[in-house]
Amino acid sequence: MEEKFNRLLFIPIAAVLFLMIGYQYVCPADSNTCYFRSADKGLYQRYSSGFESVYTEPELDEDLPSKITSKFNFTARDLDRHVDFNIRGDDVMVFLHIQKTGGTTFGRHLVKNIQLEQPCDCMPGQRKCTCHRPGRADSWLFSRFSTGWSCGLHADWTELTSCVPVVMNKRDKKSAQKNKRNFYYITMLRDPVSRYLSEWKHVQRGATWKTALHMCDGRPPTQDELPACYSGEDWTGVPLADFMSCSSNLANNRQVRMLADLSLVGCYNMSSVSELERGRVLLASAKANLRNMVFYGLTEFQRKTQYLFERTFGLRFIRAFTQINSTRAASVGISEKVRWRIEGLNALDVELYEYAKELFLRRYQHNRQRQHQEERQRRWQERQQRQRLHRTYLAELWRLGGGGGGEEEEQMKALEEVATTEDYSSQVVRW
C-alpha cells in the first residue's frame, strides 16, 4: 500500500519539477531569452551578479561597419587595454582635457555619473568635487572637476606627465606607496574641422585661455616663441579669416601638440628644427602617446566611448551617454575652399584623428568579440550547472519513487531526453 502511495505521489512531484526544469532551460536566469517590456531603457542590462553587463546595440548612426578598412598595423596589446583599476589602492586616473572635444561633458560624467562605493562629493554651487577613495582622504581622479587645474589651465601631455606625480605626492604626504602609483592617462578627441570651428566660435565669444602655462623643460615659452594673435584683453568677434591667418594660433593642430612630447622638438622654439621635421616628430609622438594611453574616447561616438571606458576600467556609468550633434560647430556653414584651408592648417590633427578613429573602432570591435566569448563561456557554465542540478533532481525523484521499477526507469530516461531537447532548443533561439 505504501509503495503504491509513493508511486502516486511521484507523478505530481515529477510533473512540477519537470515544469520548473523546463522553464529554467527555456528562460535561464540572467538571460534575455524571455524578455518582458520595461520602462527602463538603459544602455546596459545588468546581470544579477552585478559584475557583468550586456551592451545593447547602439543607434543605427553608430553602427560599426562590418569590415573596418585597415590602414595601420596594431598589435594585440594595442587593442586589449583592460586594466584592474585599484580605486582602493594607489591608482590614479588622469584626464587630459583638450579644448572643444567634449571634455567638459566627459569630465562631469567622471565625477557625477560613475557607480562607486564612495561617490564623488559634489556640493551645489562648487565647481570641484571631492573624489576620495573608500576610507581614505586621497583622490583617485586628477581632472578639472576633482583637483582643478593643478598643473595649469588645460595642461597638455608634456605638462601633465612632469607635474601630476609631484602634485599627487604633495597631496598625499603620508602615503608610503606614492612611488608605486599607477597613472592612467585618458583623453577625448574630436574631428579636427569641427573642433577647430568650435574653438573659433568660443574665442569669438571672448574665451582666451591666456592663463595657460604651456610649461616645457621647466619653463614657459617666451613672447617671441609664442606671440599673441590679438592685442587687448581678448579676441571677441574675430572673423574666421583672421582666426585662420594667425600663424601662432594654438588652435592649429591643437590635438597633436597637446598629446605629443614637446621637449623632442625644443618645446616652443620653432628654430630648433625645420617645420617639416617638427611636424613629423610631433605626429609620431602624439600617435605613440595616444596608442599607449589605457583609454581615449571620440566625441562622435559617445555610446562606444562609454562602452570602452566601462570595459577598460571595470567601472559602470549610471546613465547612458547622449550623442549630441547639434553643436555650434555644426551650425557653421563653410565653403569647400574654407574647409580645405582648415584641413591644411590642421593637417597633423587630420592624420592623427584618422589613426585614432581606426584604433578606437578596432578596440571596440575587439572588446565586443571578447564580450561575446565571455558570454558564451558563462552560458556554457550555467548549462553545466543546470545539468548537474537536473541530475540531482532525477536522483531524488528516483529515490522518492522507490527505485528499481521498470516504469520509473523509462520515466527517468524520458525526462533526460526531453531536458536535452529543451536545452538544444534554447540555444537555437539564442543563435
Image (tube, helix red, strand yellow):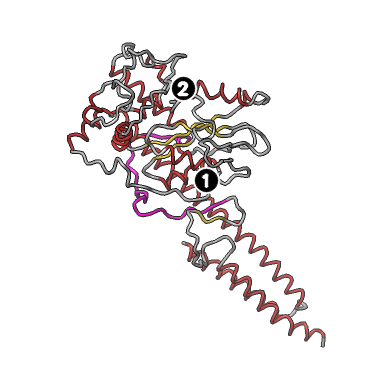
Residue 253 sits in quarter: top left
Question: Which residue is most to the bottom?
Answer: 1
Q: Is residue 116 visible?
A: yes
**Residue 291 or residue 271, whichever sits in front:** 271
| Residue for badge 2 | 159
Q: Which residues are magenta?
A: 52-78
Callout 1 amino acid: Asn
Can you tell which mark lies on residue 113? 1
C-alpha span from label 1 to label 2:
27 Å
- In reply to whether residue 103 is colored magenta, the answer given is no
Quadrant of the snapshot with the N terminus: bottom right
Query: Mark 1, residues whose alpha carbon is within 10 Å: few (<14), some, or many (≥20)?
Result: some
Measuring 26% from the left and 21% from the top, which residue is drawn there? 247
Callout 2 amino acid: Glu
Residue 220 sits in quarter: top left
**Percent coordinates x, y for residue 415 in the rendering:** 63, 74
Q: Is residue 410 visible?
A: no
Query: Mark 2, residues whose alpha carbon is within 10 Å: few (<14), some, or many (≥20)?
Result: many
Measuring 36% from the left and 51% from the top, which residue is drawn there? 63
**Percent coordinates x, y for residue 377 in the rendering:** 56, 53
Please, is residue 302 above or below residue 388 in the view?
above
